Image (spheres, helix red, strand yellow):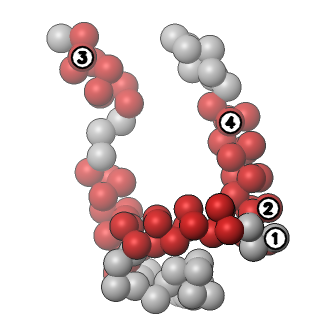
Amino acid sequence: MGTNTGINYRRDFEEYLEILMKGIRKKKRSILNVFREWDRVVFPNSDSSIMSGGGHDQNMSSGLKTALDMLEADEAEEEVQDELQD
C-alpha cells in the first residue's frame, strides 16, 4: 500500500492483470489493441509478440532484452518524487 497515497497497488495490479488476461482469453478487441500497441512500441521488429502467437523461448528475444534494458534505465517513483522535492 502506498504510504502517502493509501493506494493498494497490489490489489490494483491484480485487478488490471485479471482484466488483461480475461481479455486475451476471450479475444476482446480493446485488450488485444492494448497489446498490439505495446508490441509496436516495445517490441518493434520482434516475433515474440503475444499477438503473433510467439512465446518466450529459452533464449531471451532481442525485443525482451530491449524492454528489460529500458525498464532498468527507468527511474523508480521514489527517485522522481525526491527530485520534485529538491
Identify the residue position indicated by label 3 in the image.
84
Q: Nearer the viewer, mark 3 or mark 1?
A: 1
Q: Quadrant of residue 5?
A: top right
Residue 56 seen from this side = no
Marks 4 and 3 close (CB-CB < 8 Å): no
Would residue 54 appear left or right of 67 to someone viewing this image? right
Marks 4 and 1 close (CB-CB < 8 Å): no
> How many residues crowd around disc 2 within 10 Å: few (fewer than 14), some, or many (20 or more)?
few
Q: Nearer the viewer, mark 4 or mark 2?
A: 2
The tag earlier along the polypeptide, 4 or 2, is 4
Q: Which mark is residue 26?
A: 1
* Kind of residue sitting beneath label 4: Asp
Name the spot of residue 13 as percent of width and height, x first: 66, 42
Relative vertical location of residue 47 with respect to residue 29 in this rendering, above or below: below
> How many residues crowd around disc 1 within 10 Å: few (fewer than 14), some, or many (20 or more)?
few
Q: Quadrant of residue 65?
A: bottom left
Is 80 in front, or is 50?
50
CA gap between label 4 and label 2 equals 15 Å
Marks 1 and 2 close (CB-CB < 8 Å): yes
Identify the residue position indicated by label 2 in the image.
22
Name the spot of residue 73 as percent of width and height, x first: 26, 51
The tag earlier along the polypeptide, 3 or 1, is 1
Which quadrant would the C terminus be assigned to in this image? top left
The tag earlier along the polypeptide, 3 or 2, is 2
Looking at the rendered structure, the secondary structure element under dot 4 is helix
CA gap between label 3 and label 2 equals 38 Å
* Kind of residue sitting beneath label 1: Lys
Name the spot of residue 40 as percent of width and height, x first: 40, 72
Name the spot of residue 11 as percent of width and height, x first: 73, 34
Which quadrant would the N terminus be assigned to in this image? top right
Is 58 in front, or is 16?
16
